Amino acid sequence: MNYFADPEVARRYAASRPYFHPVVFSRLSQIAAMPEPLPLGLDVACGTGQSARALSTVVRHVVAVDASVDMLRHAERDAGDLAAASAERLPFRCATFDVLAVGLAFHWLERGPLLSEAIRVLRDPGWLVIYDNWFPGNMRENPAFHGWYDQAYLSNFPSPARDRRPLSTSEAQAAGFTFVLREQFSNFVTWTCNELVKYLCTQTNVIAAVTRRSLRLEEVEQALSSALKPLFEHQQHGTFEFEGFLWFLQKAV
């Protein structure tokens, strides 16, 4: 199921997802020792274009694809050339791109077909960048937030099933890639209560529950706001930690 194939979901996603993506491509520039941007990059499962925008810092031109037309309609203006396409069946010629990025989406995709397409469309020795960023439910100013998130939020809005398995070295090698780097990172976002609620309503936890229970996103938003306001009683803003990983692979030559 594509949880992002909905106009309202796409609109909220575009408005309320944190922009941490430059961290990933700054690290790629360091690891690849790039004296200048590479010619052409492809952002796969680009969503509303945040990853494509960050990818443009290490390539001269970006092409971005997503299976959801609604997400593409809400893409940022500087997201590059946009096209509706499946990650597992890319409409591009062989050996076209220098970097292929998959941000916050690898767990939703069929990894075998994706890796086959990546090795096909990348030039030698192209880079495959896979990364993710998730919300573990920690608020620096109020430790009680984690209890609410773990016990109340995740109980009402459990995470939908996805393929969380790490990509193994043997899988990468079988597909024609060499692992160059595996790295963890963290980043922080400062939100008001209302901004946090807006973000939570972009999570697939909420989207899946809305679909399954025939709820309205506005109803969920109101309920979350009521539950969270007491946790912001002594401050206007909260600082929230995100955790992530990045994998840099290079096409073996």
Image: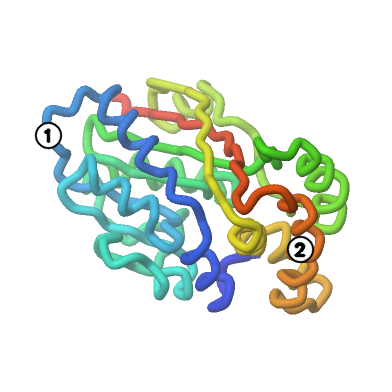
At 33% from the left and 61% from the top, the residue drawn is 91
Estimate the x, y position of residue 10 in percent, counting from the top left.
52, 70
- Between 233 and 46, which is closer to the camera in this rendering? 233
Location of mark 2 (residue): 224
Residue 251 position in % (x across, y down): 32, 30
Crowd band around label 2 with a 10 angstrom C-alpha radius: few (<14), some (14–19), many (20+): some
The answer to whether residue 128 is left or right of residue 149 is left
Residue at x 80%, y 70% (from the top left corner): 212
Would you name the residue on which mark 1 appears? Answer: 36
Assign a secondary structure to mark 2. Answer: helix
N-term mark: 2 or 1: 1
Figure quadrant of residue 220: bottom right
Q: Secondary structure at mark 1?
A: loop
In the foreground, 150 or 45:
150
| Nearer the observer, 75 or 123 | 75
Q: Quadrant of the C terminus?
A: top left
- Residue type for callout 1: Glu
| Left/right of residue 28 with respect to residue 114 in the rendered view | left
Q: How is the image coloured?
A: rainbow
Residue, far front: 234
- C-alpha gap between disc 2 and disc 1: 46 Å
| Residue sitting nearer the eye, 178 or 159 | 159
Say above or below: 200 vs 121.
below
Q: In the displayed structure, would residue 124 be above or below residue 156?
A: above
Image coordinates of residue 167 in percent, x first then y, are 55, 30
